[in-house]
Amino acid sequence: MLNFLLPLVFLFQTQIAVEPTFEWVTPTTHDFGDLELSVPAPHEFKFKNTGDAPLIIDNVRSICGCTATEWTETPVLPNEIGFIKVVFDARKAGYFYKKVTVYFNSQKKGEKLYVEGFVE
């Protein structure tokens, strides 16, 4: 009987995983305005851990090679601020609108950040 119950207990524990609790301190879209070609432009998005447990960034994904990212690599404790730094390096002229996806504590659905601007 015990062999039957152990898998059910494990399954139940994995089903009640709590989503991380946070709020963005900065807007989730940043407009760089006019940029020069091949001149990297950085912007830092900030968030606050509003939960009771440490908040961890598992991964940050950008949709193109023109957007590099850095982020807080240590757990962000409750009531502390963390960051995601996005550096856009324009390789062609014109308008751009790029998405960066942030995954906290094994989230299946990532949080979306956007950068936009115009390259002269």
Image (cartoon, rainbow, N blue to C red):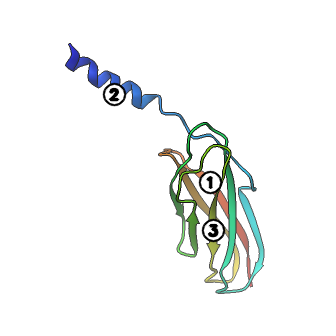
The disc placed on residue 47 is none
Q: Residue at x 65, y 58 (%)?
A: 113
- Neighbor class of circle 1 (other Cα within 10 Å; few <14, some 14-19, many 20+) is some
- Neighbor class of circle 3 (other Cα within 10 Å; few <14, some 14-19, many 20+) is many
- Neighbor class of circle 2 (other Cα within 10 Å; few <14, some 14-19, many 20+) is few
- At label 3, the amino acid type is Val
Q: Which residue is mark 3?
A: 86
Q: Secondary structure at mark 1?
A: strand
Front label number (3 vs 1):
3
Q: Residue at x 63, y 73 (%)?
A: 87
Q: Check contact, mark 3 vs mark 1: CB within 8 A.
A: no
Q: Residue at x 39, y 24 (%)?
A: 12
The disc placed on residue 112 is 1
Identify the image quadrant of the N terminus. top left
Distance in Å between CA atoms under marks 3 and 1: 12 Å
Q: Secondary structure at mark 2?
A: helix
Q: Which residue is mark 2?
A: 10
Measured as percent of width and height from the top left, residue 118 is found at 74, 76
Q: Is residue 92 above or below residue 61?
A: below
Distance in Å between CA atoms under marks 2 and 1: 31 Å
